[in-house]
Image (cartoon, rainbow, N blue to C red):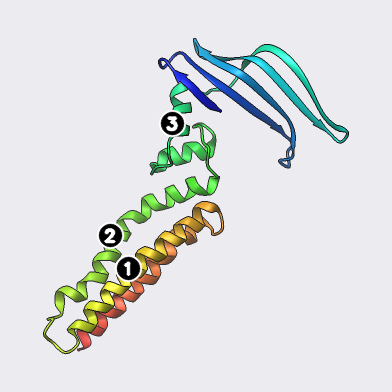
Amino acid sequence: MTVTAIRSQRVASAAVTTAATTASGALIGRITAKEGSYEDGQWTLKSLSETTLTPNGASDKTIGSEIWNVSLTPAEVVELGLPASRLSSQASRSALEGSRPSNRAPSFYEMQIQETYASALAAFVMLLLSLPVAFTPTRSGGGTGFLITSLVLGLLYLLTNGVLDAFGESGALPPFVATWAALVIFTMAGTSLLLNLEDR
């Protein structure tokens, strides 16, 4: 759906294309409207062209206008067209349940939910990885080594976390694994580094 103008929260005009699919996701038809207007709580599609796909080929027919029964407001259409941003867990659950418009794969919203809970632990991991730097005198024999190790681990954590997030949002990895794997691994690495520092 492409928005051409938004005049207010009640009135809008847009070019609309909708697709019809089977239960397995196969495309069986398409309806294109040169104009779709939203007024008084409902969409009216005008200058409709319907394409139906059959085993024998495609057929087209022209329809005048009809009511489009969807619970989609102009404000929500604009929101769907904006670049992806961080969503709250409540908004992500609403998108998964179908009570909020969505234009991303379910795995994206599942990742948003997991990251809401993981964000606090992410700050703890970065703090844990930096502790050896705070407690090691730079003039001591192993001070430089701990400093470099902490820096490398911090950069590796950011890189690994970013890659796993991308895999999780695309559905290549389960969202739970993609969110928590780096946190668990680098928490263990940071703890090990800190324990080695105490043994010195």
- Quarter of the image for residue 124 reads bottom left
> Residue at horizontal 78%, vertical 23%?
60
Label 3 packing within 10 angstroms: few (<14), some (14-19), many (20+): some
Tell me which amino acid carries mark 2: Ala
* Residue at image location 49% in from the left, 32% down from the top: 100
Cα separation between marks 2 and 1: 14 Å
Q: Write down the residue under mark 3.
A: 79
Task: Return the disc, 2 or 1, that comes first in the chain's sequence.
Answer: 2
Residue 112 is left or right of residue 68, and the answer is: left
Work out which quarter of the rendered image holds the C terminus and state it: bottom left
The first of marks 2 and 3 along the sequence is: 3
Secondary structure at numbered mark 1: helix
Tell me the crowding category of disc 1: few under 14, some 14 to 19, or many 20 or more residues within 10 angstroms, Cα based: few
**Residue at 42% across / 62% down in the picture?**
180
Q: Is residue 63 visible?
A: yes
Disc 2 secondary structure class: helix
Give the label, 2 or 3, closer to the camera.
Answer: 3
Q: Residues within 10 Å of mark 2 (few under 14, many from 20)?
A: few
Instruction: Classify 154 as above or below 36.
Output: below
Report, in whole angstroms, how far the alpha carbon at label 1 lies from the one at label 3.
34 Å
| Residue found at the far right of this picture | 56
* Picture coordinates of residue 126, whole percent (x, y): 27, 65
Q: Which numbered disc covers residue 155?
A: 1
First reached walking from the N terminus: tag 1 or tag 3: 3
Name the residue at 74% across, 40% down. Answer: 26
Which is closer to the viewer, label 2 or label 1? 1
From the top left corner, tell me how far across and down residue 32 is, in percent.
Answer: 66, 23
**Disc number placed over residue 123 in the picture, else none:** 2
